[in-house]
Amino acid sequence: MAEPNNTAPEYRVFDFVITTGNTIKSTATVTLGGKLGKTVKTRYGDGPIDAAYDAINKALRLDLSRSFDGVREPDVKSFWRSRSFELTKFDIRAVTEGKDSLGETDVTLRYEGASASGTGLDNDIVYSAIKAYIAAVNELVPAIRADIAEFCKSSAEIGGAGKGGAT
């Protein structure tokens, strides 16, 4: 498990818009805020939560790509192609009763051997799922940043080719 992050979360969702239905592909537009500002991404998925998670992943990658000092763009793309979040647990349930019941979501994510869990609570189950995912992502940020730093170091040592990049 990743070490608990006792500082303010690095990332948060400012807003999201979901379009879903039984005759259309679900779409999510997510505004993700980080230390360097806001990033907006729209993605499609096999349901509203899948679309939202994919939009968060794309926004996160774009924001974190600003951390690649001196690394060529093709190598940054190669870095992200070879890495992903694996959703290893997803559990959603009602924790109160009635029309205004609260939904609680628990997720566990894995990134390059590190694992973190997050919990979300909201009367909107999609927002509950988004909150849980962002909580887990924030726990993994130190591991992701360490991975980026190692990649940049190895890229500089071999003349910009980095792991998985062109040689």
Image (cartoon, rainbow, N blue to C red):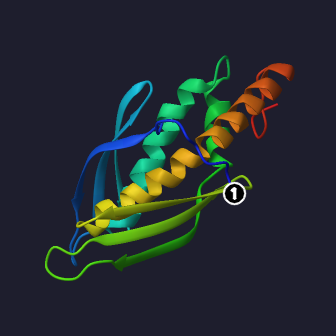
Depicted 13 relative to depicted 67: above or below = below
x, y percent for residue 161: 78, 28
Residue under the point 26% across and 71% down: 102
x, y percent for residue 61: 52, 40
- Please count the marks in the image: 1
* Residue 25 is at least partly visible in this image: no
Q: Which residue is mark 1?
A: 1
Residue furthest top in the image? 70
Q: Is residue 54 left or right of residue 111?
A: left
Residue under the point 68% across and 22% down: 71
Q: Is residue 58 left or right of residue 33?
A: right
Depicted 13 relative to depicted 151: above or below = below
Looking at the picture, tell me which residue is in the foreground, 128 or 40. Answer: 128
Looking at the picture, tell me which residue is in the foreground, 155 or 85. Answer: 85
Depicted 12 relative to depicted 148: above or below = below
Report helix, strand or loop for mark 1: loop
Q: Pointer 1: residues within 10 angstroms few (<14), some, or many (20+)?
A: few
Q: Amino acid under label 1?
A: Met
The C terminus lies in quadrant: top right
x, y percent for residue 44: 35, 59
Residue under the point 62% across and 43% down: 80
The N terminus lies in quadrant: bottom right
Q: Is residue 117 left or right of residue 43?
A: right
